[in-house]
Image (cartoon, rainbow, N blue to C red):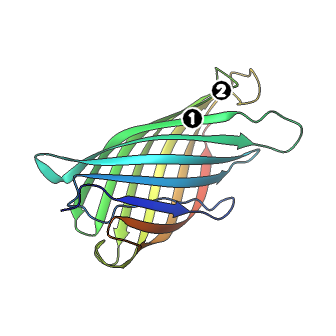
Amino acid sequence: MKTRQLALTLALVSCLSVGASALDRNARTVGEADIEFTSYKHMDAIRLNVWDRTALNYSRDWSIIAAAGIGEFSRSGPVDNPTLFFGALGAMWYPTETTELSLYGSFEWTDKNQNFQIIGGTLKAEQRFVMQASSVSPYLTASASLQSAKADPWTASADASTCLLLKIGAGIDLIMTEDVSLTFQFTFNDSRNFS
């Protein structure tokens, strides 16, 4: 039995983002890395995330998931772009061999504005067409995140807003070696502001 696997990811542009998926649910711990590009109304963000999935001792159908990330907000003009930090913690459930459901909370902040933060909760589903152990494993993914953003990352403004961020997409896992897979995931993002 493998004890650790690493999934690498690549991305394209703007409203396309990337993710990573584990190949072997029988592994005790699965490490993942992904690069995420996100386009907002007035700015863009790029973030490198490192995820860890650890199966619970009593049931391989449940895992604890944790993540840490670092990136940068950017917008046009002569501005000093802030560094973005990210953390997440939650749980993942495998109801079938080809289905993943996860629920996690996240927190984002910057180094430039102490008032800026994004607190969110995400529900995510992933459905595969074949088993993950296959050399090529296509899948569909969808998620809904309720996020509360406080302040503007460039100013001292303390305005708050709440939005629902919806993502839907498709991806493919390609097994490169026994321990490494390459994952391409293309996701369309849409958000609805409440305030």
Q: In the rendering, which numbered label is found on residue 129?
A: none
Compared to residue 44, the image places residue 106 above or below, namely above
CB within 8 Å, label 2 to label 1: yes
Q: Say which of 115 and 146 sits in front.
A: 115
Q: Say which of 172 and 9 sits in front.
A: 9
User: For residue 88, what is the image quadrant?
Assistant: top left
* Residue drawn at x 74%, y 20% as measured from the top left: 156
Q: Is 105 positioned to the left or the right of 157 in the image?
A: left
Q: Say which of 135 and 19 sits in front.
A: 135
Q: CA distance from mark 2 to mark 1?
A: 8 Å
* Residue drawn at x 64%, y 21% as measured from the top left: 115
Residue 89 is situated, as x and y percent measured from the top left of the image, at 37, 38
> Of label 2 and label 1, which has the lower sequence position?
1
Q: Which residue is mark 2?
A: 111
Q: Amino acid at mark 1?
A: Phe
Mark 1 Cα within 10 Å, few/some/many (few <14, many 20+)?
some
Q: Which residue is mark 1?
A: 85
